[in-house]
Image: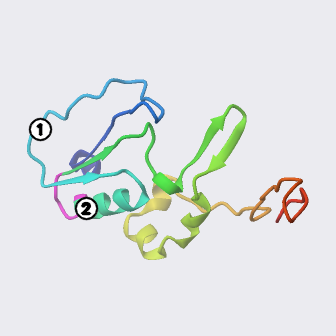
């Protein structure tokens, strides 16, 4: 896969973030055309376009996973939380098409209900939830 060969992704952990189970290993190649700091959805899209154009791209991410706000993760065992993944629906269709994301498993998943926000009993909403 030529795009993957030109696009390297490195992850390193910090104390306030989940640590990677693997030790960080510096890439063998010392020179890159582009280094992108941050493996969120914007950084990954930029890296993919740059790599697709033939540049050698390195993406650095401090967390154990990539995707930034487009990630849903299990923070408490058995419970998954969105880090704003619902905003992925705002991704331009042209990006999905240009990068052939459907071929790589990308798909939009509808949310039902669209939102769930519990409130405290002492709040103006008296413990009711907002949908």
Q: Residue at x 86, y 59 (%)?
A: 129
Q: Is residue 31 magenta?
A: no
**What secondary structure is found at the residue carrying circle 2?**
helix
Give residue 124's position: percent from left, percent from top. 86, 65
Q: Residue furthest left?
A: 31
Give residue 77's position: percent from left, percent from top. 69, 31
Left or right of 80? Residue 16 is left
Q: Tell me: residue 118, above or below residue 124.
A: above
Mark 2 lies on residue: 52
Q: Tell me: residue 52, above or below residue 94.
A: above
Q: Residue at x 37, y 24 (%)?
A: 22
Give residue 52's position: percent from left, percent from top. 25, 61
Secondary structure, magenta segment, majority class: loop
Looking at the rendering, the stretch of residues picked out in magenta corresponds to 51-56
Q: Earlier in the sequence, mark 2 or mark 1?
A: 1
Q: Quadrant of residue 88?
A: bottom right
Few, some or many residues within 10 Å of mark 2 (<14, 14–19, 20+): some
Mark 2 to mark 1 CA distance (whole Å): 19 Å
Q: Tell me: residue 23, above or below residue 106.
A: above
Q: Quadrant of residue 49?
A: bottom left
Left or right of 31? Residue 102 is right
Q: Report the colour scheme.
A: rainbow
Mark 1 lies on residue: 29
Identify which residue, 54 or 76, lies in the foreground. Answer: 76
Left or right of 48? Residue 106 is right
Q: Residue at x 43, y 24 (%)?
A: 21
Q: Is residue 55 magenta?
A: yes
């Amino acid at each position: 896969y030529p795009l993957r060969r030109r696009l390297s992704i490195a992850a390193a952990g910090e104390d306030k973030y989940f640590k990677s189970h693997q030790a960080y290993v510096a890439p063998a190649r010392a020179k890159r055309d582009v280094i992108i700091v941050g493996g969120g959805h914007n950084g990954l899209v930029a890296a993919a376009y740059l790599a697709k154009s033939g540049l050698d791209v390195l993406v650095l991410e401090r967390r154990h996973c990539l995707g930034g706000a487009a990630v849903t993760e299990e923070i408490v065992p058995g419970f998954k939380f969105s880090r704003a993944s619902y905003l992925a629906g705002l991704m331009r269709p042209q990006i999905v098409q240009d990068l052939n994301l459907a071929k790589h498993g990308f798909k939009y998943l509808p949310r039902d209900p669209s939102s769930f926000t519990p409130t405290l009993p002492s709040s103006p909403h008296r413990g009711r939830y907002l949908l």
